[in-house]
Image: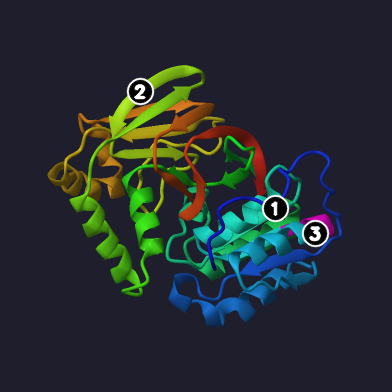
C-alpha cells in the first residue's frame, strides 16, 4: 500500500452513522503485507470469520488512499465490524475509519510489524487471532482501548494506535521513502547509514499538558502502546487503557551512543540510559524544524503537531 500524508475525511464523532446490529463484517486485507508470506491464508481467515454467523464483505482497494476511502464507506454503510489482515500499516488505514465510532475492530497480524495487535493482546498467529475475533463476534464481546489523535496546525487529523516517531527513526523513514534504489530492506539499511553520518540532535519544543519542555534530542517517540518497528519497545510502559500518552526522549546522542543504545530498545532497556527521559501526558504539543512524523510506521504529518490521548476511541474484538 502507498503512504498518504493527510486525512481527506472528517474526524469521527457522534454524528457518524451507527453500526447496524445485523450488519456485515468488512475485511481490509493487504496481500503484500509481510512480503506476502500469509497471502494464501486469506480464504481460511474469511471462512473462520463467516463461522461467527455474520456475512463477511471483502473490501477492494489498490492503494493506501483507496483503502481508507473504502473503509470510511463501509462504516457509512453500517457495518458491524471492521477486520484488517496485514501489518501496522493496514491497521492504521482501518483506524482512520473506525476511531471514535461504535464499529468494532479486529486486527489479524499478517505483516512485518504487528505492534498494535501484539500490544493489545492478540495472538501472533493469524489463524489464532481470527479465532479470537470470531469468538468475540459470536459472543457480542468487545473492549475499549485508547487511540492517539494527531492534529496539524491546519486542522488535518490522523489517528494512530501504536507509536508516533518524530526523531531519528522518522528521519530514516523519510529518507528511505525518497530513495528509488536499492529495493527491499537494503534501502532502509542504506538510509540508516546515511542518516547516522548526518546525525545531529534537533531542537524540540514540547508542551506536556501545557507544561513547556525544550530539549535537544535525537530520538522522540509518543506512544499509545509500547512498540514500533516490529517489536522495538520504545515506550515500554505505555498502556493503551490509561488515557495517557508516554513520551520518550533520547537526548544529545552522538553516533556511537545511538548505535549502542538502539539494540536495547527491543527490551525497553534504553529508558535507563542517562540521556533518555520519559514523561506522561494527555496532550503533547510537539514542534521541530524539518521533521515529518511517522505513525504506526506510516508517513503522517509534518511538525508541529498536537497529539491527544482519546480514551476508549476504538472497541476491539477480544
Whichever of callouts 3 and 2 sits on the residue coming sooner in the sequence is: 3
Image x and y of residue 136, in percent:
69, 56
Magenta segment: does it hold 272? no
Q: Nearer the viewer, mark 3 or mark 1?
A: 1
Magenta segment: does it hold 78? yes
User: In this image, 110 relative to 156: left or right?
Assistant: left
Q: Nearer the viewer, residue 214 or 242?
A: 214
Secondary structure of the residue carrying tag 1 is helix
Position of 205 relative to 268 (above/below): above
Q: Which residue is mark 1?
A: 97
Q: Quadrant of residue 100?
A: top right
Q: Nearer the viewer, mark 3 or mark 2?
A: 2
Q: Residue at x 35, y 23 (%)?
A: 214
Secondary structure of the residue carrying tag 2 is strand
Disc sitting over residue 122 in the figure: none
As measured in the structure, the alpha-carbon distance from the residue carrying label 2 to the one carrying label 1 is: 34 Å
User: In this image, 230 relative to 239: left or right?
Assistant: left
Residue bounds of the magenta highlight: 75-81
Q: Are marks 3 and 1 in contact (CB under 8 Å)?
A: no
Q: Nearer the viewer, residue 20 or 30?
A: 30
Image x and y of residue 315, in percent:
67, 46
Q: Nearer the viewer, residue 186 or 311?
A: 186
| Quarter of the N terminus within the rendering | bottom right
Position of 179 relative to 297 (above/below): below
Q: Nearer the viewer, residue 173 or 87?
A: 173
Q: Which residue is mark 2?
A: 214
Q: Residue at x 54, y 31 (%)?
A: 242
Q: Which residue is mark 3?
A: 79
Q: Residue at x 40, y 26 (%)?
A: 205
Amino acid at each position: 500500500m502507498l503512504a498518504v500524508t493527510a486525512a481527506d475525511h472528517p474526524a469521527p464523532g457522534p454524528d457518524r452513522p451507527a453500526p447496524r446490529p445485523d450488519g456485515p463484517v468488512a475485511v481490509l486485507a493487504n496481500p503484500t503485507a509481510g512480503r506476502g508470506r500469509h497471502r494464501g491464508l486469506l480464504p481460511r481467515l474469511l471462512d473462520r470469520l463467516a463461522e461467527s454467523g455474520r456475512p463477511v464483505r471483502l473490501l477492494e482497494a489498490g492503494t493506501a488512499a483507496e483503502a481508507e476511502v473504502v473503509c470510511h464507506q463501509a462504516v457509512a454503510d453500517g457495518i458491524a465490524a471492521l477486520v484488517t489482515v496485514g501489518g501496522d500499516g493496514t491497521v492504521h488505514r482501518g483506524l482512520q475509519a473506525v476511531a471514535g465510532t461504535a464499529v468494532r475492530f479486529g486486527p489479524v497480524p499478517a505483516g512485518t510489524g504487528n505492534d498494535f495487535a501484539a500490544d493489545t493482546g492478540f495472538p501472533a498467529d493469524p489463524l489464532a487471532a481470527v479465532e479470537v475475533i470470531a469468538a468475540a463476534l459470536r459472543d457480542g464481546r468487545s473492549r475499549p482501548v485508547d487511540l492517539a489523535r494527531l492534529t496539524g496546525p491546519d486542522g488535518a487529523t490522523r489517528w494512530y494506535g501504536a507509536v508516533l516517531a518524530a526523531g531519528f527513526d522518522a528521519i530514516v523513514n523519510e529518507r528511505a521513502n525518497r530513495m528509488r534504489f536499492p529495493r527491499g530492506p537494503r534501502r532502509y539499511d542504506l538510509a540508516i547509514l546515511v542518516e547516522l553520518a548526518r546525525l545531529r540532535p534537533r531542537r524540540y519544543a514540547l508542551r506536556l499538558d501545557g507544561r513547556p519542555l525544550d530539549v535537544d534530542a535525537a530520538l522522540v517517540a509518543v506512544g499509545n502502546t509500547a512498540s514500533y518497528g516490529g517489536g522495538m519497545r520504545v515506550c515500554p510502559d505505555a498502556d493503551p487503557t490509561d488515557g495517557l500518552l508516554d513520551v520518550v526522549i533520547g537526548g544529545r546522542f552522538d553516533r556511537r551512543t545511538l548505535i549502542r543504545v538502539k539494540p536495547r530498545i527491543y527490551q525497553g532497556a534504553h529508558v535507563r540510559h542517562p540521556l533518555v527521559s520519559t514523561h506522561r501526558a494527555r496532550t503533547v504539543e510537539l514542534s521541530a524544524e524539518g521533521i515529518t512524523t511517522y505513525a504506526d510506521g506510516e508517513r503522517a504529518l509534518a511538525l508541529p503537531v498536537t497529539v491527544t490521548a482519546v480514551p476508549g476511541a476504538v472497541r476491539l474484538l477480544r
